[in-house]
Image: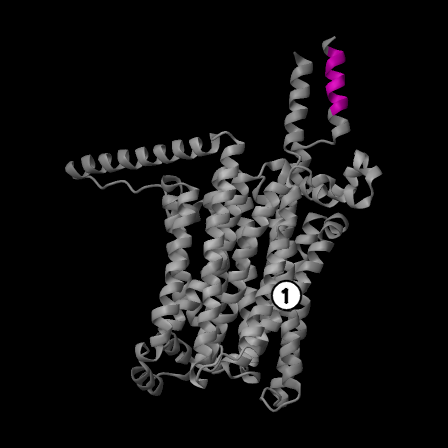
Amino acid sequence: TRVCHARSGASRSSAFAGRGDALVARAADGAESSATSPAKDAGPVAALLEPMRGLWGQLIPMASMFFWMALANGILDALKDTLVVTAFGGAEQIPYLTVYAVLPMSFVFVGVFAKFSQRWGREKIFYVFLGVFMAFFALFTLVLYPNAAALHPTAAASALAATLPQGLAGGIAVVTNWVYSLFYVSSELWGDVILSLLFWGMANETTRLQDASIIYPLLGVGANLAQATSGAITKWVSGTWAPNVPAEQVWAVKLKFLMTIVMGCGVAIAATHAYIMHRAHLTDGGAGRAAAKKAMAAAESAAGDLKRQNASRLAEGKKPKKPKTGLFDALRFVLHKPEVFCLALMSVSQGLSSILFQVAWKGQLRILHPSPQAYSAFMGDVQLMSGALTCVLMLAAPWLFKKLGWAGTLGVTPKSAMVLGWAFFGCSIWAAKAGFLVQVSPWLPVLVWGGSILYVIERAAKFSLFKPAEEMVYITLDDESRTKGKAAVDVLGAQVGKTGGSFMQQGLLLWCGTIVAALPALMTAHTFIVALWLWAVKRLDVMHGAELERMHAPEEKEEGDADAVGVAAA
């Protein structure tokens, strides 16, 4: 009996070998471990593909779904910046949008998700959220944008601009261009809600722990192709394609074409998700669907019981009890779960550093390319470069995980942001003092392209290295952390970070008047925030290292212990 218990404990330890650095080792050394299989005699390609045996049917649909999500995200990213920055004439509108529009809607989404995820089930809430986004994009394309000039209160905005300080011009523009502001909010939330929360929630539900370390790093294939494809499409539509319409209608026709692609992506996402879930239900014999229905019934029953209890309490003159699901419960969960808190801190820091850099860079880009078509074409080039570099980093990811370790690879993104941020802000401060931040300056294109390099490297490292490493942490956590905690981190974390950056910028705009004058303060804040990001990475590595040392022993040692127990039992 003792031998059986020992070997059972070794089996359980082996089952959890996907945790932390062990997951990374599998992802990085999968090709080497396959060398001991019969595929060795079939050549290096077969040996490389050996770990994927039996997993192609799961990887290809998930990568395809990721492709459609990322393709829509790339197009929306280019369009939202084009509409907002060019409509206002600068990037000062973005901080106000982040604080007073994107953040409140992020709270709404997280509250709805935390409240209804169990009562509706993950599949239903996926289609509900996707349908809300698609419905708004259709409304924007067919109704709001064609009538934007009539819907925007430009006369009232001009009166306000004449009486309020210059630093509040961005806030006035948010209200004036409310159609574009709504589009910006929806496009910003698409990446957080659909691409991060809902996709990875589906992936964590349908992927076995022992398969995740192989499949997750390869899901970037879909995102990489989508980045390059969205960049090429945006560049062609914005620059090369010349529709046979009057000049004043050209951009409207191009925008409608791009939004049609986005809505087509929505249909493809829904169809692919339905196929993945159908296949998952067939694989588990319907056990997953039955468990989801049971959880939904339990949640409905608990809600009904609480409603009846509150009715009785009200009849007795007592205060009703509040449900323990929703936004504040999700936030409390983040604060009390150390690993989730570190993930949230990394997400907040990433959002803060990103918004501080992007507003400065996009303000310079607006000076260089003031027209919507030129601005959009440039962003298409940037998206194309981002996709290409992400492909390179994805191919290098196994080697990086092996050489740098989990924490080292996770730290590539913040370290890149730190070093390149110093270079960008330093050059920007020099150019501002020298008077080079004007359209006719030969140094402005150099500075804008330098900022583009930082933008591309940061995004490529985030999606090819940072995000897979982050998800490797989630698959070691419990179900509540992977739903409630992940919703708070993925949707609120980045937006809270961007909001903090926006508050900083609003204060600096009120104090300095322009973003250019505030560049030294932006550089200081950017450095401090990225340092905090690196601290969170180190702290999470310490916690995982302690967990691995406590829970996992080398396989040889486990076998030796089991044999020793067997001898003692004999």
The secondary element bearing badge 1 is classed as: helix
Locate residue 494, reporting x and y percent: 50, 59
Which residue of the protein is positioned furthest toward the front in this rendering?
244
Image quadrant containing the C terminus: top right
Residue depicted at x 27% and y 40%:
321
Locate residue 156, reporting x and y percent: 29, 82
Q: Indicate whether residue 561 is drawn in magenta.
A: yes
Which residue of the protein is positioned furthest toward the right in this rendering?
41
Q: Quadrant of residue 97?
A: bottom left
Range covered by the magenta-colored residues: 559-568
Prevailing secondary structure class for the magenta stretch in the rendered image? helix
What residue would you read off at disc 1? 386
Locate residue 507, reporting x and y percent: 46, 74
Q: Indicate whether residue 541 is drawn in magenta.
A: no
- Please, is residue 555 above or below residue 230 in the view? above
Colouring:
one colour
Residue depicted at x 65% and y 11%:
1
Residue 60 in the figure: left or right of residue 399: left
Locate residue 419, reporting x and y percent: 68, 67
Residue 213 in the figure: left or right of residue 329: right
Front residue (pair 20, 166): 20
- Please, is residue 59 above or below residue 77 in the view? above
- Please, is residue 566 above or below residue 268 in the view? above
